[in-house]
Image: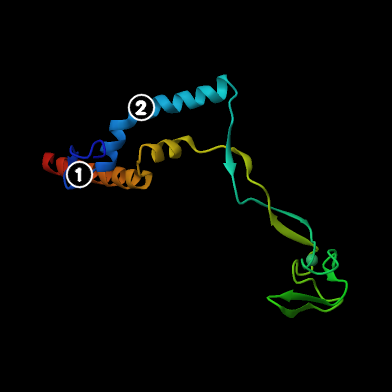
Amino acid sequence: MRPGWSRGTVVGSVRTPELDRLRTVRDRSQTIGEFLEWLRSEKQVTMTRWTKGLTDTRVCRGVQGDTDRDNCDAGVVRHNITQIVGGAVTFRAHKDALCPVCRGSGREEYEVEAQDVPWTPQIEELLAEFFEIDLDKVERERRALLEELGRQGARERGSDA
Ligand SMILES: [Zn+2]
């Protein structure tokens, strides 16, 4: 069971289960946050993340499998290109047409090898994820609570009059 699940604050008709859970992890969360800040400021520790699926661009190599690997000349096809695909000869492009790979740009996108990439997460969001706190719910509950307290205040002022 998640911490703070069984107990619950109730103010008027407003329940605040996520705020309650946030309260139960606040001390630990704060300590971790301070530790991370200490690593950054005192130890000059930076974070990177092993990242796959990044792309870069390079000079277009044109249609692969063609006899002339450099059949793309700054985005323009140098000669008629046919490819053998699945045993069938497939026509790809006319000479002087826009290259079908880069569509005339002369550059093609390609996937680079996985690498360490600098990572600067929002620490508050990271801690919330770690403690399984939904910050949107927290904000909604906080607003509902303030509205309820405002209504109660108005009623009390009304009864004093
Ligand atoms: Zn090209």
Relative side of 27 to 34, left or right: left
What label does residue 154 carry, if any? 1
**Cβ of disc 1 within 8 Å of ligand 1?**
no
Ligand 1 shows up in the quarter that is bottom right
Front residue of this view, candidates 150 and 129 = 129
Q: Residue at x 11, y 42 (%)?
A: 159
| Earlier sequence position, callout 2 versus callout 1 | 2
Q: What is the quadrant of residue 85 in the picture?
A: bottom right
Q: Residue at x 17, y 48 (%)?
A: 13
Q: Nearer the viewer, mark 2 or mark 1?
A: 2
Secondary structure of the residue carrying numbered label 1 = helix
- Residue at the location (23% across, 36% down)? 4
Residue annotated with mark 2: 28
Q: Position of residue 31 (x, y in %)?
A: 40, 24
Spatial CA span between label 2 and label 1: 37 Å
Q: Residue furthest front?
A: 87
* Residue appearing at x 18%, y 43% in the figure: 152
Q: Could you tell me residue 122's position as x and y percent?
A: 50, 38
Query: Looking at the rendering, in which quadrant would you find the N terminus?
Result: top left
Q: Is residue 28 left or right of residue 99?
A: left
Pick whichever, 117 or 85, lies toward us.
Answer: 85
Q: Locate residue 22: give its quadrant.
A: top left
Figure quadrant of the C terminus: top left
Q: Residue furthest top?
A: 42
Q: Is residue 80 above or below residue 65?
A: below
Q: Amino acid under label 2?
A: Arg
